[in-house]
Image: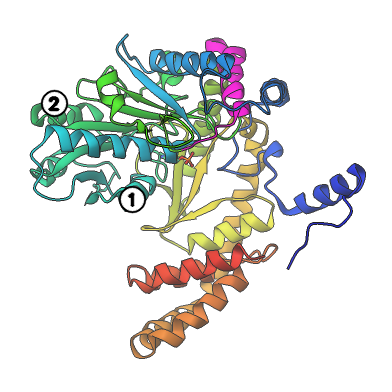
Amino acid sequence: MKKIPSNGLSEAELFSEMEAMKKDDLKWQTGRNFAYVYYPGEEILNVVKKAYQMHFSGNALNPSAFPSLRNMENEVVSMSANLLNGDEEVVGSLTTGGTESILMAVKTAREWGKKNRNLTGLPEVIIPATAHPAFHKAAHYFNVKVVLVEVENDFRVDPQNIKNAITENTVLLVGSAPSYPQGVIDPIEEIGKIALEQNLLFHVDACIGGFILPFLQQLNYNIPAFDFSVKGVTSISADIHKYGYAAKGASVILYKNSTLRKFQFYTYTKWTGGIYASPTMTGTRPGGAIAAAYAALKFIGNDGYLKLAKSCMETTLKIQNEIRQIPELNILSSPDATLFAITSDDFDIYELGDEMGILGWQIDRQQMPASLHFSINPAHEAVADELLQDLHNAVAKAKKISANKVGKNIQLQAIKTMQKVLPKSLFEKLTQLAAKHSEVGGKRSAAMYGMIGEIQGKGDLDEMIKEFLDKMMKE
Ligand SMILES: *Cc1c(COP(=O)(O)O)cnc(C)c1O
C-alpha cells in the first residue's frame, strides 16, 4: 500500500515527480488526440486558468456565501439559454459535466411524470441506440426504464420508431445534436412534433454540439434546427468544457421553464445542520469551474467562437475530403458537424488505430460497426496535413497486417467455441488478456477489441469490464 510521506516532499521534488508521471498522457497541445481535450490555444487557455485560480477555493454550495459565483453561474446559464434560442422563460443550472446534466434531465422527467402522467409502472425514457451511456446510467441510478430504439443506416433515429415505442409510462423522449459516435443530428423537429402531440418531455443532448452548432449556423453551414427554436423541446444539455473551451467541470442543463426545473431540485428540511437545498447532484461545488466557464464565454465572445468553429469545420472538411480519396476507408453516414467515424471493408480498422497509435495519434475505437472516432478541435488545423500523411502510410501497413491475420480469425473462432464450452475459465483468461493489452505503452489493442466484439452482448462482458476497472483503480 502507498503511504502519505512521513515528511512532505519539497515543491521541487513533488513537481519533478508529477512531471515525470505525465509522460504517457495525451499530447493534446499538439493535436494528437481526437477526444477528451478541446484546445483553443494558449491565450484562451491561460485566461481560463487564471479565472479558475481566482476562485480556486470558492464553494457554490451556499449561493449567499459567494454572490460572485452565483452571479457568474446565473449569467452563464442565461448566455447559454440565449445562444440556444431560449426565450425569457428558459432557466437552468450549471453542472459538473454532460453526465450530470443528463442525470438531472432524466430525474426531472421522472418527477414530472409522477405528477403529470398516470403511470402504471416504472417511468420510461425512449432513447436512440446512439445516445450517450449517461442516459443508461441515469436510468440505472434513478430506477427508470430505458426503451432503446434502433437507429437507421445513417445512424439517425426514425421518429416513427420513437412514436411506436411510446406507452402510458413514457415520460421523456431523447435526441442527440449530434450523437457522439458518428456525429449525426437526430431529426429533432420531427421528434419535437411527437413530443408536443403526446404531451411528453423531450430532451436534446447537445452536450457536444451546444457550443459549436450555433456558431456553425451563424457561419451558414447547413445545420438543422436542434435547440429551443424547435417546438416541443423541453430541455437541453450543453457542455461548456467541450467546445465552450472552459475548464473541466462545466455543463449546463436548460429547461423550457422554471416549473420544469423545480422537479430537478432536492431539499431536506429536518437536518440538525439546518435546512438543506441543492439544485443538482453535487453538494460542494468548485468555484473554479464556474469562474472558468464564465471567463471562457466572456473572453472568447461570439467573434472568438466563430473563428474557432470555422477552424474546426474547415479542418474537418479537409480531413474528410482527403479520407474520401482513400479507397479502403469509409466515413460513416453524413456527419453534420465536426465529429465523424471511419471504417473499412478491406481490413481490420482497429489495426489502423494501432498503426496510428505507433505514429503518436490517439484515436478511440468504436463498435457496431468497428470504427475509429474523430472529434476535431482547433489544435488540428496545424497538424491536418501530417495526420493525413500518416493516415495514408498507416492504411498501407494495416492492410498488410490484415492479410497476415487469417490466424487471428481462426483464433477468434476457437474463442467462440471455447466460450460455449467453458465460459467461466475463458472469461478469466480474457480478463487477464484485456489487462495485459491495456498496459500503458502496450500499443497493439486490435486483438483485444476483436475479442470484445466476439463476446459482445453475452452478459459476462460487463463483469469482465468491471473487474478490469477494479484493477485499474488499484494501480
Ligand atoms: C460528452 C458527452 C456526454 C457526456 O458528457 P461528460 O461531460 O463526459 O459527462 C453526453 N452526451 C454527448 C453527446 C457527449 O458528447
Tell me the element at label 1.
Answer: helix
Camera sees residue 218 = yes
Camera sees residue 173 = no
Instruction: Tell me how many marks there are.
Output: 2
Please name the predominant secondary structure of the magenta segment in the image.
helix
- The image shows residue 420, relative to residue 434, as above or below, that is below
> Which residue does the numbered mark 1 point to in the structure image?
136
* 155 left or right of 430 in image: left
Residue at point 38%, 74% (across, down): 460
Q: Amino acid at mark 2?
A: Leu
Task: Categorize mark 2 by other alpha carbons within 10 Å: few (<14), some (14-19), many (20+).
Answer: some
Magenta highlight range: 282-303
Residue at point 51%, 82% (across, down): 429
Q: Is residue 451 magenta?
A: no
**Depth check: 324 or 43 in front?**
43
* 43 left or right of 36 in image: right
Q: Amino acid at mark 1?
A: His
> Which residue does the numbered mark 2 point to in the structure image?
196
- The image shows residue 31, relative to residue 474, as above or below, that is above
The location of residue 203, given as percent across then percent down, is 28, 32
Q: Is residue 292 magenta?
A: yes
**Mark 1 vs mark 2: which is more N-terminal?**
1
Q: Residue 256 lies in what quarter of the image? A: top left
